[in-house]
Image (spheres, rainbow, N blue to C red):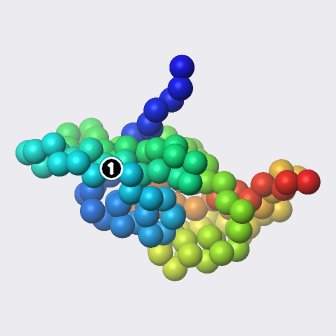
């Protein structure tokens, strides 16, 4: 078994595409119109792992946008140049909850995306 995609509830497709592509650096892998306002939108990281951007429609879905993990960090972004990505995210409006920490496993800081979802930005120690 292989996990194919993980869904991420968003308010609007285009604002989500813009942020996750331009701020986080993912690439747009699919944007297919399924009619009646529905789209199949997938963003991918450099290794091809994808996130399905799912537009919240129902009230319970809309209420979960930005809090899909109950306030916990739900996403983990691994980078090779922490400082460059940290700066890019700040410029894009990401809210960092802390200053970068230097842990035995690498450099890490928790940030919130445009919806308030919590992410770990991690540059792992390689040696």
Q: Residue at x 38, y 51 (%)?
A: 29
Q: Is residue 66 above or below residue 61?
A: below
Q: Nearer the viewer, residue 41 or 104?
A: 41
Where does residue 108 sit, x and y in percent of width and height?
73, 59
Tell whether 98 sits left or right of 37. Answer: right
Q: Residue furthest left?
A: 36
On the rendered image, what quadrant is the N terminus found in? top right
- Percent x, y for residue 51? 43, 45
**Position in image of residue 125 (x %, y %):** 84, 56
Element carrying mark 1: strand
Residue 74 percent coordinates (x, y): 55, 44
> In the rendered view, does 121 fall on the left or right side of 52?
right
Quarter holding the C terminus is: bottom right
Give the residue drawn at x 58%, y 62%. Answer: 111
Judge by depth and name the residue closer to the eye, 127 or 46.
46
The residue under label 1 is 30
From the viewer's perspective, tell me whether residue 78 is left or right of residue 22.
right
């Amino acid at each position: 078994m292989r996990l194919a995609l993980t869904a991420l509830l968003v308010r609007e497709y285009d604002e989500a595409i813009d942020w996750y592509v331009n701020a986080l650096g993912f690439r747009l892998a699919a944007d297919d119109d399924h009619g009646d306002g529905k789209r199949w939108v997938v963003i991918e990281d450099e290794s091809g792992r994808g996130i399905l951007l799912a537009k919240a429609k129902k009230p319970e879905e809309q209420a979960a946008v930005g809090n899909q993990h109950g306030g916990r960090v739900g996403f983990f972004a691994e980078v090779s140049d922490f400082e460059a990505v940290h700066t890019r995210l700040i410029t894009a409006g990401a809210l960092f909850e802390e200053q970068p920490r230097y842990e035995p496993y690498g450099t890490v800081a928790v940030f919130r995306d445009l919806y308030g979802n919590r992410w770990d930005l991690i540059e792992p120690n390689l040696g």
